[in-house]
Amino acid sequence: MVPKDGKWRKTLTPAQYRVLVEKGTEAPFSGKLLHNEARGDYACAACGTKLFASDAKFDSGTGWPSFEAPANRENVELKADSSHGMARTEVACKKCGGHLGHVFDDGPTGTGKRYCINSCALDFKASKPAAKSPQHAQKANRRNKRPFSGN
Ligand SMILES: [Zn+2]
């Protein structure tokens, strides 16, 4: 459970506390991870549990970092949330119970899901560049070899 005591008051910033503990929502387009396109993992800002991978991130235009799926479904908890007169599904960190955001069924990708997550509830850990190089090169090769169509 979320400790509503002094511990998180000390370890989290006021903005993080308002989201993770008090289930607030940061202002759209305010989060520093919104336009982060680096490869890596997004972890819970409170307890460090890995929640989302950069591969699942997309730009939804809503102003909050959006993901098509969690990195590990076991690490997130989905709960019905009827606050503010809306029927929504809350996304929380399974390990510490911290509030992350909401998930919607209007995702534009194959999963059909849109995990709308507060930037300040996430802690980004960039992956080492070496891990992405081979795959990147292969993709570029395939593109270059594709024959031109038409004419
Ligand atoms: Zn957590």
Image (spheres, grey):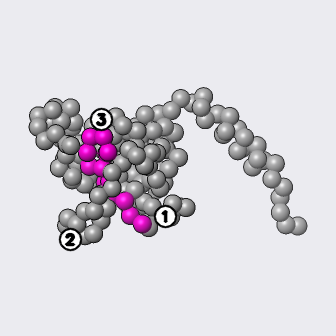
Residue drawn at x 36%, y 48% is 76
- Visible residue check, residue 63: no
Q: Is ligand 1 closer than 8 angstroms to the Cβ of mark 3?
A: yes
First along the sequence among labels 2 and 3: 3
Residue drawn at x 37%, y 59% is 103
Q: Label 2 sits on what residue type? A: Gly
First along the sequence among labels 1 and 2: 2
| Residue denoted by label 1 | 112
| Residue denoted by label 2 | 85
Q: Position of residue 128 (x, y in %)?
A: 53, 29
Q: Quadrant of residue 86?
A: bottom left
Tag 1's secondary structure?
loop
What is the span of residues highlighted in magenta in the rendered image?
91-105
Q: Label 1 sits on what residue type? A: Gly
How dense is the environment of label 2, judged by Cα within 10 Å: few (below 14), some, or many (20 and up)? few
Question: Secondary structure of the magenta portion, mostly?
Answer: strand
Between 149 and 83, the one nearer to me in the picture:
83
Instruction: Measure how far apart labels 1 and 2 are at the Cα level.
Output: 24 Å
